[in-house]
Amino acid sequence: MTTTKTRITDLLGIKYPIIQGGMAWIAEHTLAAAVSNAGGLGLIAGGSAPIDYLREQIRLTKAAVGDKPFGVNIMLMSPNAEELAQLVIDEKVPVVTTGAGNPGKFMAAWKEAGIKVIPVIPSVALAKRMERAGADAVVAEGTESGGHIGENTTMCLVPQVVDALEIPVIAAGGIADGRGIAAAFMLGAEGVQLGTRFLAADECQVHQTYKDLVVGAKDTDSIVTGRYTGHPCRNVKTKFSKRLANGEKDGSLTPDEFEQITLGSLRKAVQDGNLEEGSFLCGAIAGLVKKTEPAKDMIEEMFSQAEELLNK
Ligand code: TUI
């Protein structure tokens, strides 16, 4: 068995079946280009950034990767989703991933433009809808992931999505080394998406405080906040995220107050390293991430380990 040639590497024209999470405020051109140049698929996060900024990010990435593919993630809850859906067509972006909603209404236009579309989904029902709508693959994302999450775990979700679909499945959530990649392949995935491990890439431009939190995290350092708002988010445990969790639990923060306090909190974490008011989104696997290094070294080391395990 080999991990390195799958329907995902064929579909995307990449060397290793790995895509980088489209982490809002985090995934910009230096990280995306590093991952694509290392043989994976780098992603630029649409998040809710201004369109002119994203156009520039796309052009910088194109200049850095040459003819290697890269993608843009569109966060569907974002107010700029419509505009960004058109920008990826205008800029001839080869791959689009989507999160936090159903991209059905954009699908026909993207397919018409020749874009490969890979929705991130938290359930079998949505995965089936995406396949019917023409998705080329899906990312089945377990609740171990950082950021906005669904309920099911990677271990439970991935094989059920694999069984339900014909198109290839990429596993996400709780994967940060070659063992996780090998496990995902055993569940039937043909690719993996990693976010948390890439937070520690040298090319990832988050504030040093953010990297220190990820690299210093232990197994119990992740917490889910905001379930009562309908938008649960996995973060690193900090004074701020613990205050949010307590406010939710003891009723001292209403859902509206919670939304108000967290507005802009990801930017404060990423750009300012603000421990008092920032949300340091991060997956439950952070405890496995022990050092910062170039994305290329991460990818090569992980696939060498995964190959060895799967060939045993
Ligand atoms: O989207 C993510 N992770 C994210 S987005 C984000 S930014 C954010 N900011 C404020 C509030 C919420 C998010 C940080 N992390 N992952 C992919 C993902 N998609 N996880 C869950 C879903 C999802 C949820 C519901 C996908 C589809 C869906 O469909 C609902 C429907 O319309 O049927």
Image: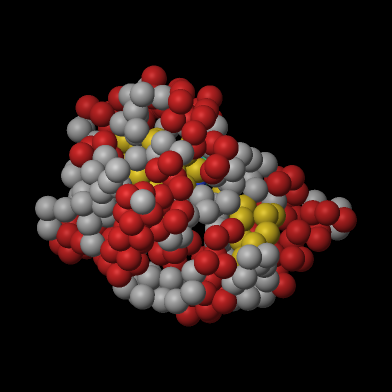
**Percent x, y for residue 81?**
42, 42
Q: In this view, does 225 lie to the left or right of 180?
A: right
Quick check: can you spot residue 42?
no
* Residue 218 vertical placement versus 190 (above, below): below
Whether residue 186 is visible, yes or no, is yes
Residue 182 x, y percent position in the rendering: 41, 50
Up/down of 224 relative to 111, above or below? below
Compared to residue 218, the image places residue 181 above or below, namely above
Q: On the picture, is 161 further left or further right than 32? A: right
Q: Which residue is drawn at 51% across and 50% down?
A: 173
In the displayed structure image, the side of residue 92 where residue 245 appears, left or right: right
The residue sitting at the front extreme is: 312
Q: Where, by quadrant of the figure, is residue 261 drawn? A: bottom right
Question: Depth check: 236 or 184 in front?
Answer: 184
Residue at the outermost top position: 132
Question: Residue at left 53%, top 78%?
Answer: 212
In percent of the image, x 63 and y 40: which residue is there? 151
Q: Nearer the viewer, residue 104 or 16?
A: 16
**Horizontally, is 252 left or right of 96 in the view?**
right
Residue 34, given in percent of the width and then of the height, sits at 26, 65
